[in-house]
Amino acid sequence: KAGVTQTPRYLIKTRGQQVTLSCSPISGHRSVSWYQQTPGQGLQFLFEYFSETQRNKGNFPGRFSGRQFSNSRSEMNVSTLELGDSALYLCASSLVADTQYFGPGTRLTVL
Amino acid sequence: GENVGLHLPTLSVQEGDNSIINCAYSNSASDYFIWYKQESGKGPQFIIDIRSNMDKRQGQRVTVLLNKTVKHLSLQIAATQPGDSAVYFCAETVSPGGKLIFGQGTELSVKP
């Protein structure tokens, strides 16, 4: 089975722009979670989607949003980018509510 | 790596020795725990998990121990190899598949 895939792998944006990241879960997995990883804060939970519905949400501002499609693929969007949004964004998938498997991440740099 | 700024605890071991990585978790209501390994430039890789109704679980060369009384989790790696060099994270959640709360990570360095 193919693992979790994320696109793009690297992105460079400037402050004020918006960005959309994409995640394709492992085939058959219906839950997709997003995490932000930074040197200062470590790994932090953003949100989780299951059957196209947001099921859990972390403590991030409303500039961070996401969605899930009927094929379980998910996107996250960050609007009005700030320098502090530079991070590795990780997507993880699970069957329903069990072990989460991570993709390689998207490295976002905000200049 | 991703966590240089956190001043990660570092464990340095000789190849062939056993490694023990410790983790204190935060929520007494957590009932599912996972260990992940993250190599530079990659996403976290699942190693082993354990549910709160168990206190020990073994995998291939790895063992996880759970002490709910003191909210402590440990990962033991037998016969550590250079390929085990990575940052190791423990994660906890109240229910499997929900929001994972990660520890700060421990950097394991294996000397050949």
Image (cartoon, rainbow, N blue to C red):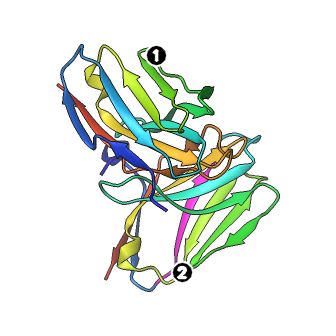
State the image coordinates of residue A4 (x, y, percent, origin top left).
Answer: 45, 51
Front disc: 2 or 1: 1
Q: Which residue is drawn at 73% across and 52% down?
A: B70
Left or right position of A78 against B94:
left
**Where's the C terminus of chain B, which quadrant?**
bottom left
As rendered, which of B13 and B48 lies closer to the eye? B48
Amino acid residing under circle 2: Ala
Q: Which type of secondary structure does the marked residue at label 2 adopt? A: loop
Task: Tell me, yes or no, whether the two marked residues, 2 and 1, touch with CB atoms within 8 Å.
Answer: no
Image height of B90 relative to B74, above or below? above
Amino acid residing under circle 1: Pro
As rendered, which of A84 and A16 lies closer to the eye? A16
State the image coordinates of residue B27 (x, y, percent, origin top left).
Answer: 70, 39
Question: Which residue in the protein does label 1 denote?
Answer: A61
Question: Which residue in the protein does label 2 denote?
Answer: B78
State the image coordinates of residue A88 (x, y, percent, origin top left).
Answer: 34, 40
Q: Is residue B78 magenta?
A: no
The magenta stretch is B17-25
Left or right position of A2 against B96:
left
Q: Residue at x 62, y 26 (%)?
A: A53
Indicate the chain on which mark 2 is placed.
B
Q: Which type of secondary structure does the marked residue at label 1 adopt? A: loop
Indicate the chain on which mark 1 is placed.
A
Residue sitting at the far front = A70
Image height of B1 relative to A55, above or below? below
Image height of B101 relative to A26, above or below? above
Considering the whole magenta stretch, tell me its main secondary structure: strand
Image height of B89 relative to A33, above or below? below
Q: Measure the alpha-carbon separation of dots 2 and 1.
A: 43 Å
Residue sitting at the far right = B53
